[in-house]
Amino acid sequence: MRIILASSSPRRAEILKKIGIDFDVIPSRINEEFDEGDFGEVVENLAKRKAKEVFERTFDERIVIGADTIVVLNGEIFGKPNGFEDARNFLKALSGKSHEVYTGVAFVWNSGEYSFHEKTVVKFRELPDELVEKYVRSGSPMDKAGGYGIQDLGAVFVEKIEGDFYNVMGLPIGKVWEFLFKKGWWR
């Protein structure tokens, strides 16, 4: 079975490689707009749209994995920042507070589809302005929900985490593996 990751995220690819999955990367072409509603459903629906769009452009026996991640603080969605000022504002808003990270994952294959979402709570320590500036100037926040990566310098922002670490990186790999294993698609 050919496995396709419908994402250009290098972090999602890195996570899949950690568990020995052979896959191709074919990024989705859909616009990442968020619907209204339950945050878990929002990311799950976007992940489904991504997986379906790539599935429709590909052929043969295959399974497409779509994923999307958002950060939520006080009911407000923080997607990817639209520039340095946006990233700076995200990090200052998250400083010293707890927020939720939601990742939706969808699988689409020739005879079906399945999706789920995962939620992780992350508590940031108070971030000094000079740390925020250094991080923003590095360019790292630009392609990450909430404007930070837990796997890079953004790791020092985190005081505590409740839930799946890999969910914060963008792919709750334990649940992904479990689904692929149960279907006989992980070898």
Image (cartoon, grey):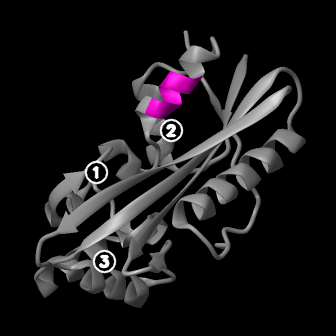
Residue 10 location, x and y as percent?
48, 46
Q: Which mark is residue 32?
A: none
Task: Identify the residue position indicated by label 1 in the image.
Answer: 151
Q: Give the spatial CA distance, label 3 vs label 1.
A: 15 Å
Residue 12 location, x and y as percent?
49, 43
Q: Which mark is residue 136?
A: 3
Q: Which stretch is magenta?
A: 175-179
Please, what is the three-letter code of the amino acid marked with disc 3?
Answer: Val
Residue depicted at 38% across the width and 72% down the height: 147
User: Tag 1's secondary structure?
Assistant: loop
Q: Earlier in the sequence, mark 1 or mark 2?
A: 2
Residue 17 location, x and y as percent?
46, 28
Task: Identify the residue position indicated by label 2 in the image.
Answer: 13
Please, what is the three-letter code of the amino acid marked with disc 2?
Answer: Ala
Residue 48 in sight = yes
Q: Is residue 39 part of the magenta span, yes or no?
A: no
Indicate the quadrant containing the C terminus: top left, top right, bottom left or bottom right.
Answer: top right
| Number of other residues with Cα within 10 Å of mark 1, as a class: few under 14, some 14 to 19, many 20 or more | few
Q: Give the spatial CA distance, label 3 vs label 2.
A: 24 Å
| Number of other residues with Cα within 10 Å of mark 3, as a class: few under 14, some 14 to 19, many 20 or more | many
Q: Give the spatial CA distance, label 1 vs label 2.
A: 14 Å
Q: Which quadrant of the view contains residue 108? A: top right
User: Tag 2's secondary structure?
Assistant: helix
Q: Is residue 127 left or right of residue 18?
A: left
Residue depicted at 21% across the width and 54% down the height: 161
Q: Is residue 131 above or below residue 16?
A: below
Q: Is residue 108 above or below residue 91?
A: above
